Amino acid sequence: MERQRTSENTPQRVHMSKMQKRRKARRARKAKAFAAIAILWFMEVSMAAVAGAVVAAIVVPLTLLERGYFSLGGEWLLVMAATLLAYHFIHKAVFRRLES
C-alpha cells in the first residue's frame, strides 16, 4: 500500500505547523550566521597571533643575549601590544571590507 502525504497528524508522523517551520528555518539561519562569525573571529585572532609571534621571535632572543638568561620582562609587553594592534587593524580592515 502506498503512503499518502497528508497535512494532518497520523500515528506514524507528526507534521509541524507553519510557525514551527519558520522558527526552525530562522534557527538554522542564526546558526549559520554564528558559525560564519566564529570562523571570521578565529581567522582574525590567528593572523594577530602570527604578528605577535614574529615580534616575539625578534625581541625575545635580543633580550636573552642582553641578560644572559631567559626572563619574563618588558619585552612581553611589546609582544602583547603588537598582537593587540595587529588584531585591531585586521578587525577594522575585515569589517570595512564587509560593509562595502
Image (cartoon, rainbow, N blue to C red):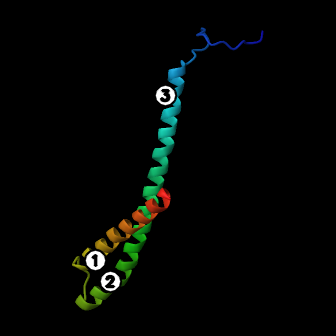
What is the count of numbered marks?
Answer: 3
Q: Classify residue 77 as left or right of residue 43.
A: left
* Mark 3 vs mark 2, CA separation in Å: 53 Å
- Residue 66's x, y, as percent? 25, 91
The vertical placement of 21 against 45, above or below, is above
Which residue of the protein is positioned furthest toward the front in this rendering?
100
Q: Nearer the viewer, mark 3 or mark 2?
A: 3
Asked if the residue at tag 2 contacts the one at tag 1, i.e. Cβ–Cβ closer than 8 Å, the answer is yes
State which mark lies toward you, 1 or 2.
1
According to the image, label 2 marks what residue?
A: 59
Q: Which residue is mark 3?
A: 23
Marks 3 and 1 sit apart, C-alpha to C-alpha, by 48 Å
Which residue in the structure is indicated by mark 1? 78
Look at label 1 and name its amino acid: Leu
Task: Please provide percent x and percent y for residue 20.
Answer: 50, 22
- The quarter of the picture where residue 62 lies is bottom left
Give the mark nearer the N terminus: 3 vs 2.
Answer: 3
Q: Amino acid at mark 3?
A: Arg
Q: Residue placed at 53% from the left, 32% from the top?
A: 25
